[in-house]
Image (cartoon, rainbow, N blue to C red):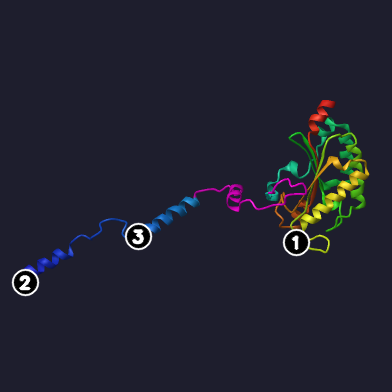
Amino acid sequence: MSLARRKKMIRVQTLPPASDGWMVTLSDMLLLLLTFFVLLISMSSFDQGLLTEVFGGPRPGSSGVLNRGAGIPIVIPIEEVPKDLRERDDLALYRRLSEPLSRLLDVFERRLGKALLRVDVIDGNLELEIMSDKLFGTLDDTLKTQGEDVLRQFGSFLKSWRGIIEIEVYTDNFPLQTSRFTDNNVLAAWRGERLVVALAENGIERTRVLLAAYGADRAVVVNDTPKHRRRNRRIVLRLPGWLQTVEKTG
């Protein structure tokens, strides 16, 4: 081989590559971007509630008997439920505010025990939350004897109350379809009607009662265990403006 040809071959072999850089192909660039986002996600923390709100989105809910608007389910893991929403052991505050309420709570604690889920004053409104299993039969709108007694005691308490009474009825999401109750909303509506009738029999005018049947909407805990479903089956009795009225009357 001639010396000139040998020099030419050496020059060709030692030429630098056409692309002098670290990003050679499109696949390399995509791989780098993917790695970046994986690292970014691994170093981030998520607000589970925000993710549920943003990605879960609102779903249509029950409009209620009085068409009080579509309900957005409130889903709270049981371990995150505030203590005052489970049981309230110390009711001294409310007993000081109202002697009739004190007597009512004493009766409810004796008759219902842990079935009295919550007693609270929210925005000046008195709220009593009761486990509906203690008032009604299973998958039925018939009041138990204990339920009739509770409504009789509540009716006596309401005789000193001249304002509006709001009743909200909730169920769990267990599939329900019987000859009488086609779904949970129908069951909730009939249970609410039974409560209104029972209060009317104890001297409370029907015109003072506002009823809303939400069925399985607005759950307070996820309906994933029998205990959680039992917690969601509840009755809320609300007296709007109760705190202001009590403070005025001393």
Q: Residues within 10 Å of mark 2 (few under 14, many from 20)?
A: few
> What residue is disc 3 on?
26
Query: 11 or 198, which is in the foreground?
Result: 198
Q: Is residue 176 visible?
A: yes
Residue 208: name its quadrant: top right
Cα distance between the residues tagged 3 and 1 = 52 Å
Q: Taking 64 as reference, is 177 above or below it?
A: below
| Mark sitting on residue 66 | none
Q: Taking 137 as reference, is 202 above or below it?
A: above
> What residue is disc 2 on?
2
- Number of the front mark, 3 or 1: 1
Q: Is residue 76 visible?
A: no
Identified by mark 2, the residue type is Ser
Q: Say if mark 3 contacts mark 1, CB within 8 Å.
A: no
User: Which residue is drawn at the image coordinates 78% and 63% (left, top)?
Assistant: 177
User: Which residue is drawn at the image coordinates 37% and 61% (left, top)?
Assistant: 27
Identified by mark 1, the residue type is Pro
Q: Residues within 10 Å of mark 1 (few under 14, many from 20)?
A: few
Quarter of the picture containing the C terminus is top right
Where is residue 115? Give x, y as percent. 83, 48
> What residue is disc 1 on?
175
Range shown magenta: 43-71
